[in-house]
Image: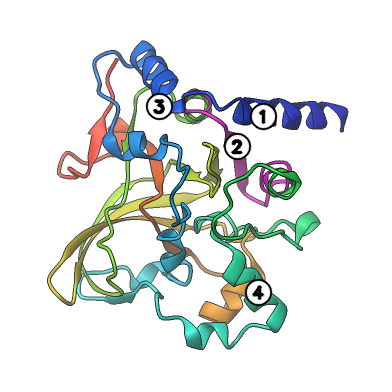
Amino acid sequence: MEFTHISFVALLCLVIVGIDASQSGEEYWKSVWPNTPLPKALLDLLLPDKGISVPIGSQEEKQYWTVFFEHDLYPGKKMSLGIQKNSEIQLLTSREQVSLKKSSQPFGINVWWDQKSSERVSQTFGVHTWGKKDTHILHDYCWSSRAIGEDKHCAPSLESMMNFSISKLGKNIKVMSSSFAQNQNQYVVEEVKKIGDRAVMCHRLNFEKVVFYCHQGNSTTTFMVSLMAFDGTKSKALTICHHDTRGMNPDMLYKVLKVVPGTIPICHFIGNKAIAWVPIDAVSDSVDHSRAISG
């Protein structure tokens, strides 16, 4: 317990110092992969967001209700991102509605069920200070016990995120991300390409300062899905399918899909405010929405 407390304080200190995450991260990237530029999708997530009114993670909140079965992932399938989710909200209790409205953390985090911390504290929109409440939220996400089938790590810098990903996948890896169109809700699946069965997902948390929530789920498959909106706009959706769903939030799964954890594979899209680290040799040459790393 004492070690956990010290580790949390160390992380908090690193974040409070306000180190130039973009510059120091770029330098560390070059030291590990000198021949590969830092991908723009990742560079954008390293920038502080002081002064902006829209919190990080708000776009990913649109994908909150987009969970689906793996057998529904095929060309021609119509998908809704759940932007208009009034009907779903009506299914929730008053307390759950308040929690959902306040939560702006990216999807892929709260989908996992922590039995020892089931009453999660949700972060409010537009938080731009690092007070006691933010500290409590950071502790709640980063130092609560991990869910079944999940290995997680909170990274206060690109260096920390890289080290965690390398420890899980090795150095021969690449970065992939989604490119959802703005303000589009209805899509049709055009193409589904399998990336591989190993990946580390890293989400930028909704804090002004840089903190990433990285996790690796047990028994997952990653896909890149080509989507077309009803107005013809093209998008790419990084998609994760979980075959071991025992650790998923039972309330969320039942309300959206009418299933219980551990019974059937569940998939969800990954929003624009997250990246996936995947082994290079697991990615087909035909998948071009990524950048290979060589060093």
Kindly state the secondary structure of the residue where label 3 is placed: helix
- Camera-side mark, 3 or 1: 3
Label 1: few (<14), some (14–19) or many (≥20) C-alpha neighbours in 10 Å: some
Q: Are marks 4 and 1 in contact (CB under 8 Å)?
A: no
Q: Position of residue 158 (x, y in %)?
A: 46, 28
Q: Position of residue 262 (x, y in %)?
A: 61, 65
Q: Secondary structure at mark 2?
A: strand
Q: Which residue is mark 2?
A: 154
> Label 1: which residue?
11
Identity, as a three-letter code, of the amino acid under mark 3 = Ser
Q: What is the C-alpha distance between the residues marked 3 and 2?
A: 17 Å
Q: Is residue 44 above or below residue 83?
A: above
Q: Are marks 4 and 3 in contact (CB under 8 Å)?
A: no
Q: Decide if residue 184 is on the left or right side of residue 9.
A: left
Q: CA distance from mark 3 to mark 1?
A: 17 Å
* Image side of residue 148 versus residue 168, left or right: right
Of discs 1 and 2, which sits in the foreground?
Answer: 1
Q: CA distance from mark 1 to mark 2?
A: 8 Å
Question: The N terminus is located in which quarter?
Answer: top right
Q: Residue at x 80, y 55 (%)?
A: 116
Image spot of residue 241 (x, y percent): 43, 58
* Residue at the limit of the structure toward the left, as seen here: 232
Residue corresponding to mark 3: 22
Q: Which residue is mark 4?
A: 98
Q: Nearer the viewer, residue 104 or 77?
A: 104
Measuring 55% from the left and 45% from the top, which residue is drawn there? Answer: 207
Comes first in the chain, label 2 or label 4: 4
Residues rendered magenta in the picture = 138-160
Question: Quick one: label 4, few (<14), some, or many (20+) residues within 10 Å?
Answer: few
